Image (spheres, helix red, strand yellow):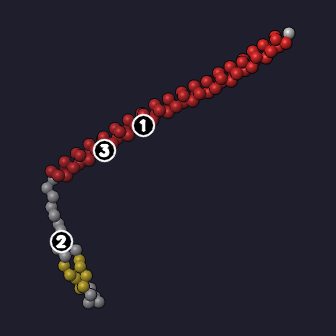
Amino acid sequence: MELCDNLEKTKQKISHDLQVKESQVNYQAGQLTTSKKQIERLEQELKRYKSEVERSQQTLITGDLLFSSTPQKNFAAPLTPNQNHNGNFSICV
């Protein structure tokens, strides 16, 4: 009779341990699913940012080409001394 009691206790312990392990597996599976969704979202966000960078670079390149093909005029004024009302000289541009 004692042997049956020990077997029953062992069976109950093993059954409990199995339930605990199944619960842990289910929790970790949920975490894994959440992590996969987050990775997927971040990958999409990264693609979007890369696309924005490429568009910005293309815009800059196009702007540089337009700017370099436009004749530039240099309106640099010579430095000339200017006397203020105190008799001091300052440089005007």
Side of 81 where 3 appears, left or right? right
Side of 14 where 90 appears, left or right? left
Q: Residue at x 18, y 68 (%)?
A: 76
Give residue 70's mark: none
Q: Residue at x 38, y 40 (%)?
A: 49
Nearest-to-viewer mark from 1 and 2 = 1
**Closer to the N terminus: mark 1 or mark 2?**
1
Task: Report x, y in % for residue 43.
Answer: 42, 34
Q: Toward the viewer: 93 or 7?
A: 7
Give residue 77's mark: 2
Q: Say which residue label 1 marks.
A: 45
The kind of secondary structure element at disc 3 is helix
Give residue 56's mark: 3
Task: Report x, y in % for residue 67.
Answer: 19, 52
**Closer to the N terminus: mark 2 or mark 3?**
3
- The quarter of the rendered structure image containing the N terminus is top right
Q: Amino acid at mark 3?
A: Ser
Q: Are marks 2 and 3 in contact (CB under 8 Å)?
A: no
Q: Residue at x 81, y 10 (%)?
A: 4
The kind of secondary structure element at disc 2 is loop
Count every numbered label the image shows and give the total: 3
Q: Amino acid at mark 1?
A: Glu
User: Image quadrant of residue 32?
Assistant: top right
Task: Report x, y in % for residue 74.
Answer: 16, 64
Q: Residue at x 19, y 49 (%)?
A: 66
CA gap, disc 2 and disc 3: 35 Å
Nearest-to-viewer mark from 2 and 3 = 3
Rate crowding at label 3 as few (under 14), some (14 to 19) or many (20 or more) other CA atoms within 10 Å: few
